Image (tube, rainbow, N blue to C red):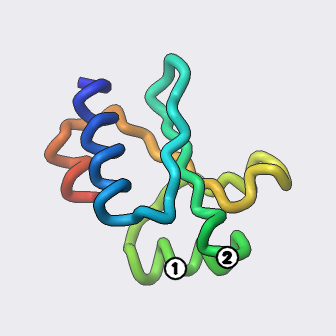
Amino acid sequence: MLELNLNFLRSFIKGRLPKVSVIEPEGTYLVWLDFREFGLGYKELEKKKLEEAKLALVSGHKFGPRGEGFERVNITCPLLILKEKL
């Protein structure tokens, strides 16, 4: 299930959000997405993802200054749910 979900996430991001980079997970179900290409501060990125995308991800800034511009997504869900949310 995880490999299928990860492959879908990669494909979705590449096709729909080409400015976003997928950080390949190392033995986990948590995938980091790099949004730094947009040049947004974490507050601006947080507002866009919640108000415009209606999506709650874990903001990287919560892990320290080096995490700013990154978002974390959990891919341990049925593929249909992941497709719906993305």
Where does residue 78 sit, x and y in percent of width and height? 20, 37
Query: Label 2 neighbourhood size at 10 Å, few (<14), some (14-19), many (20+)?
Result: some
Residue located farthest toward the top when viewing the structure as drawn: 27
Residue at image location 32% in from the left, 45% down from the top? 9
Q: 17 or 79: nearer the eye?
A: 17
Check disc 1: other Cα within 10 Å, few if <14, some if 14-19, many if 20+.
some
Q: Residue furthest left?
A: 80
Q: Nearer the viewer, residue 72 or 13?
A: 13
Quadrant containing the C terminus is bottom left
Which residue: 28% across, 47% down?
Answer: 11
Residue 61 image-quadrant placement: bottom right
Query: For the residue marked with disc 2, what is the amino acid?
Result: Leu
Q: Name the front one of labels 2 and 1.
A: 2
Residue indicated by mark 2: 40
Res 48 label: 1
* Image position of 7 with respect to 41: above or below: above
